[in-house]
């Protein structure tokens, strides 16, 4: 390749694939030391934490797209003299100084509060704004794959990975003109706002669903039959009167499924990457559509196991350790599925009838699982009405969740194409 062609290729590589039509010309590389002045944060005693001035730490960087004073988790009690040496102001960039994983070390986040000043911790490096850049643009740039690779490739350590001020100073990134930075920042901020609106909508729907369940079980919310008449009052019913153990096993044709807290009944290959079942699955429990499954194994915030309804539209099989039950109606099964989504409800039902064995194993028979009473609807028609009502709420939540995912994927694609 000739020198001229190399120059053209290099110039081309400094032009983003996707660009606003009013801008042209190559982006220019700048070192972070031209834009930021670096400083390590406060190291305080444990007695000083939990009160005082807001104190930016690693979790604030990792859990936020940008940081504002009121979103900061922690605080530290330091005098005004110390606080004045470690201020964080609008436009400053905060970097994670140390991490157990190379993927997280050097993660950056911008401070965008124009009204309040915070301070920052010892595991954080502050980049004080000294050069000309748009803070929102630089925040997005530092989250791109190219920027992350530049930083992580220069991190040091073996059991823990670290970046220092010198490393960050040496990072060279490509920038457009300030006016193009502002245009990109404004466009991406609009997408972030859309994601925030959708996330808030999802949160409100989830709160509404929780409120509906509380009203149902308190009797404040009741349904009526097709003639407008009230259904019979709910009764204290043993689960064994509304859930029935069919005791069917694998025919050898079914796929092996697991049970997940968030995904419910899910194919093992899709969930875990491969099948973990025994070679012979003849004794595996058959699960029919709408069946209720109790896992009898501790999982995260569900130390007594999880209870889910199968929403798979075909027969599948699960571990013989699981309890599998057919509900009186599909609607009642859906209602129980929603009720037991909450860890406290699972605990309240199971804690008095369960025994924990060695190594935290759960000892409970299917008969014992079905032995307790719950306040439940008597009418099968009401059960299905409630199930349909809750199903439609979940449909709305899932729709908004998918919109959030799609918008985040769209944003990720833009980040890859709008930056050099």
Image (cartoon, grey):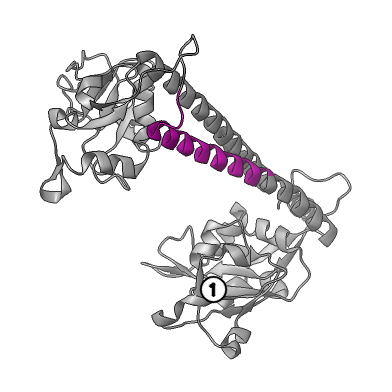
Judged left or right of residue 75, residue 190 is: right
Out of 13 and 56, give the one closest to the viewer. Answer: 56
Q: Which residue: 49% across, 76% down?
A: 51
Out of 336 and 141, give the one closest to the viewer. Answer: 336
Q: Where 348 falls versus 108 (above or below)?
A: above
Q: Where 209 falls versus 121 (above or below)?
A: above
* Residue 236 position in % (x across, y down): 26, 28
Judged left or right of residue 129, residue 81 is: left
Quadrant in the rendering for residue 251: top left
* Residue 104 position in % (x across, y down): 49, 60
* Callout 1 secondary element: strand
Q: Where are the magenta residues, as a range?
A: 194-222
* Residue 233 position in % (x across, y down): 35, 23
Out of 86 and 353, give the one closest to the viewer. Answer: 353
- Of all residues, the one furthest to the left in this rendering is 358
Q: Which residue: 44% across, 34% down?
A: 215
Q: Which residue: 42% across, 22% down?
A: 387
Decide whether residue 370 is among the magenta residues.
no
- Of all residues, the one furthest to the right in this rendering is 22
Judged left or right of residue 88, residue 393 is: left
- Label 1, residues with CA under 10 Å away: few <14, some 14-19, many ≥20: many
* Residue 267 position in % (x across, y down): 35, 27
Q: Where 222 falls versus 76 (above or below)?
A: above
User: What residue does disc 1 label?
Assistant: 55
Judged left or right of residue 154, residue 278 is: left
Decide whether residue 206 is among the magenta residues.
yes
Q: Is residue 270 visible?
A: no
């Amino acid at each position: 390749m000739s020198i001229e062609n190399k120059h053209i290729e290099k110039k081309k590589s400094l032009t983003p694939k996707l660009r606003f039509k009013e801008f042209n010309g190559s982006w220019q590389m700048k070192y972070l030391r031209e834009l930021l002045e670096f400083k390590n944060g406060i190291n305080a005693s444990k007695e000083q934490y939990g009160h005082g001035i807001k104190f930016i730490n690693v979790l604030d960087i990792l859990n936020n797209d940008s940081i504002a004073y009121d979103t900061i988790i922690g605080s530290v009690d330091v005098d005004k003299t110390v606080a004045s040496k470690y201020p964080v102001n609008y436009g400053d960039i905060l970097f994670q100084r140390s991490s157990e994983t190379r993927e997280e070390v050097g993660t950056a986040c911008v401070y965008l509060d124009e009204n309040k000043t915070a301070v920052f911790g010892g595991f954080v490096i502050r980049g004080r704004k000294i050069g000309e850049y748009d803070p929102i643009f630089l925040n997005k740039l530092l989250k791109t794959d190219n920027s992350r690779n530049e930083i992580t490739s220069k991190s040091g350590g073996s059991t823990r990975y670290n970046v220092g001020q010198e490393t960050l100073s040496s990072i060279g990134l490509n920038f457009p003109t300030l006016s193009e930075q502002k245009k990109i920042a404004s466009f991406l901020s609009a997408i972030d706002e859309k994601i925030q609106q959708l996330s808030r909508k999802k949160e409100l729907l989830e709160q509404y669903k929780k409120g509906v369940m509380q009203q149902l079980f308190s009797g404040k919310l009741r349904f009526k039959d097709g003639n407008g008449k009230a259904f019979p009052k709910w009764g204290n019913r043993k689960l064994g009167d509304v859930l029935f153990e069919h005791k069917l096993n694998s025919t050898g044709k079914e796929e092996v499924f697991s049970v997940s807290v968030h995904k419910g009944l899910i194919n093992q290959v899709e969930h875990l990457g491969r099948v973990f079942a025994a070679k012979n699955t003849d004794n595996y429990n058959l699960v029919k559509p709408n069946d209720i499954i109790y896992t009898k194994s501790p999982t995260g915030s569900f130390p007594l196991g999880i209870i889910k309804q199968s929403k798979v539209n075909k027969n599948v099989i699960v571990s013989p350790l699981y309890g599998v039950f057919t509900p009186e109606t599909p609607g009642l099964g859906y209602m129980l599925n929603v009720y037991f989504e909450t860890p406290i409800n699972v605990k309240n039902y199971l804690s008095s009838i369960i025994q924990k064995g060695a190594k935290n194993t759960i000892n409970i028979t299917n008969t014992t699982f079905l032995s307790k009473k719950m306040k439940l609807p008597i009418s099968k028609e009401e059960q299905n009405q409630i199930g349909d009502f809750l199903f439609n709420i979940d449909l709305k939540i899932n729709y908004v969740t998918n919109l959030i995912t799609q918008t985040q994927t769209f944003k990720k694609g833009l980040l890859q194409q709008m930056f050099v």
